[in-house]
Amino acid sequence: MIDRDSSGLVDVHNHLVPGVDDGARSLSETLQAVQRLTDDGIRKIITTPHLNASLTHEPIALDRRLSAIDDAFDRAADAIRGSFPEVDFRRGHEVMLDVPDPDLSDPRVRMAGTSFVLVEWPRLQVPPGTPRVLERIGDAGYRPIIAHPERYGGVDLTVAERWRDCGAHLQVNYGSIVGRYGKQARGVALQLLRLGWVDYLASDFHARPEAAIYKKEAWWRLGSMGAQEALIHLALTNPARILRDEAPLEVPPISMDRGFWARVKKALNPESA
């Protein structure tokens, strides 16, 4: 269904650093995960272990946490260079905004040391005042990317639009497109794609042998809608621009026929059917 060259894709959200969060538990699992990602055509990886924003206000604790991740990342990077020399393996974090005023000055916290930072809200809920939090991050000179906006309870297009108006970018998970997180997340993801509001697609792969990546399934689903150009932007062009510290390009909206869109709306609002 995709007839353009899809080699060299970029994945900007995953958990491959061994033993530091709920992702890879060992170096062996890291290497198995990289093998699976490369099998899906991915050649550039920014891995994003979890980090609580509150730690950024505790310099000693933050340095201890980041140093431990440094060591584990370096071991993984060395092993990946030996087994997968074609892979460009970088580091960022998925920063949980458990406080509204994170200190993002340490470049290790950000995506490959750029001005971009991948952020998420606690407990997959949207707390009050999120636009102001995003504005403060932008005012400090950083560019927030909101991880999996489609998965948050109560999120709708109004909320997503306010986030975008504050300068935030949106990263949708492949799994959401194929229903991995339920009908609600799938419906919101498709709404965002239909409007051209998604800037990046990523795996959020936690490197477990039993877990799926969903890249192939999502590409087939979106490719069947004629979304080849959008896919190239979402999985190749825009993620690669993060590595150059460049803002994402505008992504073409993905058209959906009326029957398909009616089914999506019915899934989101069964009482209106």
Image (cartoon, rainbow, N blue to C red):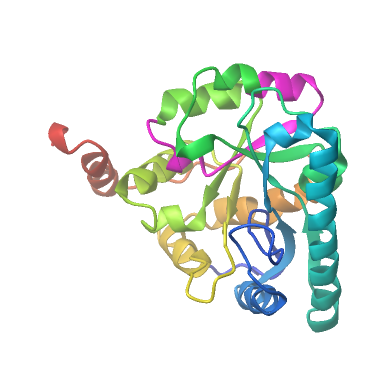
In this picture, which residue range is highlighted in magenta?
A: 134-154
Residue drawn at the location 17% of the way across and 39% of the way down:
270
Q: Number of numbered discs present?
A: 0
Residue 8: where, in percent of width, then height? Answer: 72, 67
From this view, report whether residue 51 is shown above or below residue 98.
below
Is 136 magenta? The answer is yes
Foreground residue among 155 and 258 = 155
Residue 37: where, in percent of width, then height? Answer: 63, 72
From this view, report whether residue 133 is shown above or below residue 226.
above
Report if residue 245 is visible in the image.
no
Residue drawn at the location 48% of the way across and 69% of the way down:
212
Residue drawn at the location 80% of the way across and 41% of the way down:
62
From this view, report whether residue 107 is shown above or below residue 161.
below
Report if residue 4 is visible in the image.
yes
Q: Is residue 222 left or right of residue 73?
A: left
Residue 219: where, in percent of width, then height? Answer: 49, 63
Query: What is the quadrant of residue 150 in the picture?
Result: top left
Q: Is residue 12 left or right of residue 254?
A: right
Q: Is residue 154 left or right of residue 1?
A: left
Is 51 magenta? The answer is no
Q: Quadrant of the C terminus?
A: top left
